[in-house]
Amino acid sequence: MTYSVAIAAYNAAETIADTLTSVMSQTMPPAEIVVVDDGSTDATAAIARRVSPDIIVMTQPNAGCGSACTRAIRGATCDIVATVDADDLWLPQKMEKQLDLLRSSDALTLVFAKNRQFSHGSTDMTSGEVRSGPIRSDLVFRRAVFDEVGAIIDPPGGRGDMIDWLARAREMRCTFKTVDEVLVMRRIIPGSLSYGREAAKDIGYLAVAHMAIKRRQKRMKDGQKE
């Protein structure tokens, strides 16, 4: 099974090379890698291009991770797409194991894996907390599913984009399956978009919840079953 990898990157100069190396080191390597630099003010795009001339690098004015990820996915040409954040790492057999599960699943299946957290700058890759996700970095899906669910929306504050997209996927009866094994290393960077709690960023979660309520009200009005 061939697949594309879609990566949204913003000021990821310190980590993008390691992320791309982990993607290219898969036991089942991707057919293509698409990186969208979301208006970075550092050398993210240049570093991505230096890693390999085969990597497709696009740039855009800063619009948010959801926007950049959407553009990367839409720029992919394979029927199967995997996404990863520009600071996370894939273990070598990640895609091989997830593709095995996807191959035996129906067309509406999204495949995930467990992830282990590690601190930026640390060499300890074995003692961090293990989580089941789902997160952007362990998501594998058929492109047709994305086309049906639609774009990844950037809520106010920037947080909650994938919560919203995955909720919409559930609403269209997508099945979620997880490989019961740690296949992703999730980097923890103080000050990053997903780090800690911050009211100005967390407001995105409220926006996501409001959008879900509005969709449910519409379905009820239209007479759809839950």
Image (cartoon, helix red, strand yellow):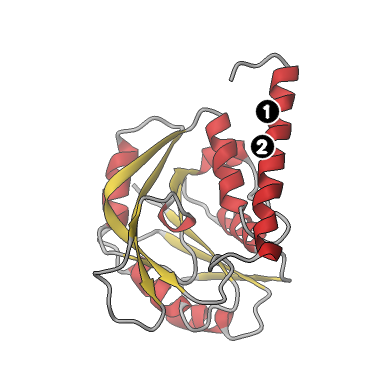
Q: Are marks 1 and 2 in contact (CB under 8 Å)?
A: yes
Q: Residue at x 48, y 32 (%)?
A: 174
Q: CA distance from mark 1 to mark 2?
A: 6 Å
Instruction: Give the structural element (helix, strand or loop) at label 2.
Output: helix
Which x, y percent locates residue 48?
A: 50, 78
- Which residue bears the numbered disc 1? 216
Q: Residue at x 34, y 82 (%)?
A: 122
Q: Residue at x 57, y 30 (%)?
A: 171
Q: Nearer the viewer, residue 101 or 224?
A: 224
Q: Estimate how packed mark 2 is, as few (under 14), some (14 to 19) or many (20 or more) residues with alpha carbons within 10 Å.
A: some
Residue 212, label in figure: 2
- For badge 1, the amino acid type reads Arg
In the picture, measured across the screen, residue 180 lies left or right of residue 88, that is: left
Residue 100, label in figure: none
In the picture, measured across the screen, residue 136 lies left or right of residue 119, that is: right
Q: Nearer the viewer, residue 141 or 122?
A: 122
The answer to whether residue 154 of the structure is visible from this angle is no
206 over 9 or under it: above or below: above
